[in-house]
Amino acid sequence: MRKSTAFVLLGPAVKDVAEAVGCSGSAVRQWPETLPRRIADRVLAAWARKHMPDELREQLERAEQAAGQAHQPLATAA
């Protein structure tokens, strides 16, 4: 994946991409033009969370609560 693709999916600003993948803006600025798979996977996961249907998001949150995991709501689409 190209770095520019990450901005198309999650941007447009460095801050937007950083928040979506859970890192700092400084880290995003240091990404290479061709993203390593681990970063590309984080971008795709963030995009999937952003576009996840509300019903599925609610099911996942209930499953996390039932499993006794620390509950942190998934990010909602803007």
Image (cartoon, helix red, strand yellow):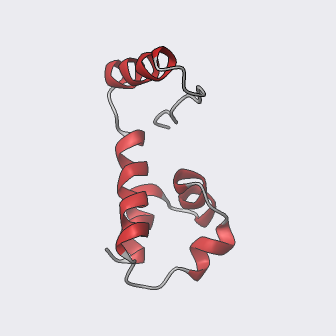
Q: Nearer the viewer, residue 41 or 70?
A: 70
Q: Is residue 67 left or right of residue 18?
A: left
What residue sits 35% from the left and 77% below the top?
2
Q: In the visual, does 14 lie left or right of 78?
A: right
Q: Is residue 22 left or right of residue 62?
A: right
Residue 53 in the image, given as x and y percentages of width and height = 32, 27
In the rendered image, which quarter is residue 39 located in?
A: bottom left
Q: Nearer the viewer, residue 66 or 56?
A: 66
At 60% from the left and 28% from the top, the residue drawn is: 70
Residue located 63% across and 73% down the image: 27
Furthest-front residue in this view: 67
Residue sitting at x 35%, y 72%: 37
Q: Quadrant of the N terminus?
A: bottom left
Count of picture labels: 0
Residue 72 lies, with reference to residue 28, above or below; the image says: above
Left or right of 41 in this view: 25 = right
